[in-house]
Image: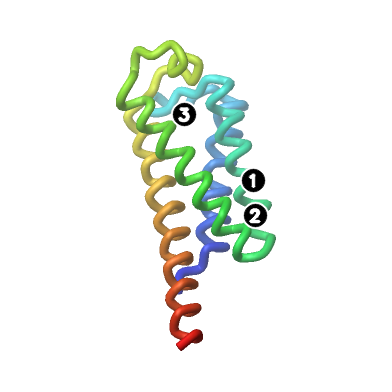
Amino acid sequence: MTNSKTVCRLIGWTCTTLGALGIAYGQLGSYLRFSDLESYTYLVFGLISIWAARRRQRTAVAVLFMVGMACFLWAALALAAPTNAWARYFGEQQPLDVLIREMIALWGGGTALREILDWRRQQTSSAS
């Protein structure tokens, strides 16, 4: 069984770091450029994930799933509609931005789904 609290904490610190870098500097070298909305969104995702990692496992799994799906939709928006007016509020979408969001989505969503399936398997085996 994977440890959802550890993954939640790692995703939380990653997002918090990206948000803080975006607020403090606005960019990280020539690789990442952050708009204000993007920086605060990362910061909120990070703080919620760190908070959830300190709660019950069920809370960590729920937050992992929600943050993972939100990052997936955020990355898909950048890939599917780069000229969309709504997407422009988040600033210019760099390839590394999209890659980081997809990694968070796969890692968070995958861990949450794995925990849910393990829990279901445990419930069905104890019921028999």
In this rendered view, identify the residue nearer to me: 62 or 37: 62
Mark 1 or 3, closer to the camera:
1
Question: Residue at 52% of width from left, 20% of height from top?
Answer: 35
* Distance from the alpha carbon under mark 2 to that under mark 1: 6 Å
Residue occupied by mark 3: 28
| Residue 57: quarter of image | bottom right
| Residue 54 percent across, percent down from the top left | 68, 60
Kind of element beneath mark 1: helix
Crowding at mark 3 (Cα within 10 Å: few <14, some 14-19, many 20+): few
Mark 2 or 3, closer to the camera:
2
Q: Are marks 2 and 1 in contact (CB under 8 Å)?
A: yes
Residue occupied by mark 1: 48
In the rendered image, the vertical position of residue 125 relative to residue 15, given as above or below: below
* Distance from the alpha carbon under mark 2 to that under mark 3: 27 Å
Q: Earlier in the sequence, mark 1 or mark 3?
A: 3
Residue occupied by mark 2: 52
In the rendered image, the vertical position of residue 126 relative to residue 88, given as above or below: below
Kind of element beneath mark 2: helix
Q: Amino acid at mark 3?
A: Leu
Question: Residue at 50% of width from left, 86% of height from top?
Answer: 126
Question: Residue at 37% of width from left, 41% of height from top?
Answer: 102
Q: Are marks 2 and 3 in contact (CB under 8 Å)?
A: no
* Quadrant containing the N terminus in the rendered view: bottom left
Question: Residue at 47% of width from left, 29% of height from top?
Answer: 28
